[in-house]
Amino acid sequence: MSELNAEPLSPIDAATLWPQLRRLDTEVIATRAGESLLVSSGLAATGLGRLPRMPRTMVLGIKRGLHYRGVVVGRELAGGAGWEAVSLRLARDKDDEAVTGLLNRLGVEVAQRGGRTLYLRCAEGSPHKEAIRRSGLMAYRIERLYAVPARGGGQPETLFRAAGRADRHGIFRLYCRVVPEHIRRQEAPTQQDWRAVLDSFDCSREFVIERDGGLVAWVGTGERESRVLVESGIEGLADATLAIIEANGPRPGTLVLAEDQGSIEREALARGHGPLGVRLVCARRLALLNPLKEVVAVPAETLALPH
């Protein structure tokens, strides 16, 4: 199978792509803001709107004549150590060559910009899973999704408080304690890598519980999803964590739990959180690409010869 040639899109290309989005109706991945980034790029290129402030973004495409066979959007995550593929769309129902070609080229572009890791999330039963794997992105974690039930009765009493900048290191230390070592080595061996992972969660609000000078629970909520990190063995902590998500999370909202968060999962099911599906978290470690300086030949007569 020959690899297709994916190319970065110029502002003019983005303007021609924008009206064609309806043709690219097969969503291989579609996390959060992927489509809005494409629409915003098209609006800015046509001069019809101002591009809002947003993270560093790349759009790559594969063309067939004047039409697009597939496009992928990547965004830089906080700290610059990682990038995330946030949208990949195809004109066909299944096009393994286009998926692999787009993700391979995205990896090259990310490496040239100094990124160390490319992340991607896809459904566990995706028909495009093998094409994603051929691009070097390997699944290393499972995320289980649950629908958060609506609760009435106003704000419950809670030990959680809003997280601030001073809590960043404490949240990383909590992550290091509660996440299995083989996962940490893969996704966040350093605090800079953790900043990228946290940014990929897309949280707009964060809450923490502090005990004995350290954090024992963290909750992050965004436009669609909520995430948790909870110290095990503390009575009532899982229940309090789910209660604040039900009170402050998005509506409708999704709770995202990793496979190692079994105690919270059992509590969520007992509280009426409905299973929605399973998602794979994939990553590809990238080599740092540093272009070599051009070598200039020096004429032999200019060299000083030994006497």
Image (tube, helix red, strand yellow):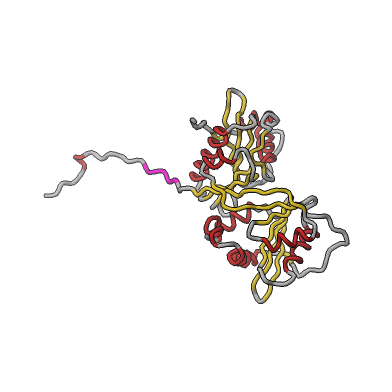
Residue furthest toward the right?
Answer: 153
Q: Nearer the viewer, residue 141 or 51?
A: 141
- The image shows residue 63 at horizontal and vertical percentages of 58, 28
54 vs 28, nearest the viewer: 28
Q: Is residue 170 visible?
A: yes
How many labels were placed on the picture? Answer: 0
- Is residue 234 placed above or below 119 in the rendered structure? below
Secondary structure character of the magenta stretch overall: loop
Residue 93 shown in magenta: no
Give residue 132's position: percent from left, percent from top.
56, 41
- Report if residue 56 is visible in the image: no
Q: Residue furthest top?
A: 65
Residue placed most toward the observer, 284 or 128: 128
Q: Which residue does the image show at 57% across and 36% down from the upper left?
A: 99
Residue 17 place in picture, x, y as percent = 64, 30
Q: Is residue 178 above or below residue 48?
A: below
Q: Is residue 286 left or right of residue 199?
A: left
Image coordinates of residue 66 in percent, x first then y, are 61, 23
| Observer-nearest of 291 and 294 | 291
Query: Quadrant of residue 100 in the image?
Result: top right
Does 112 sit above or below residue 65? below
Q: Is residue 273 left or right of residue 107?
A: right
Magenta stretch in the rendered image: 289-293
In the orientation shown, which residue stands out farthest toward the bottom?
A: 212
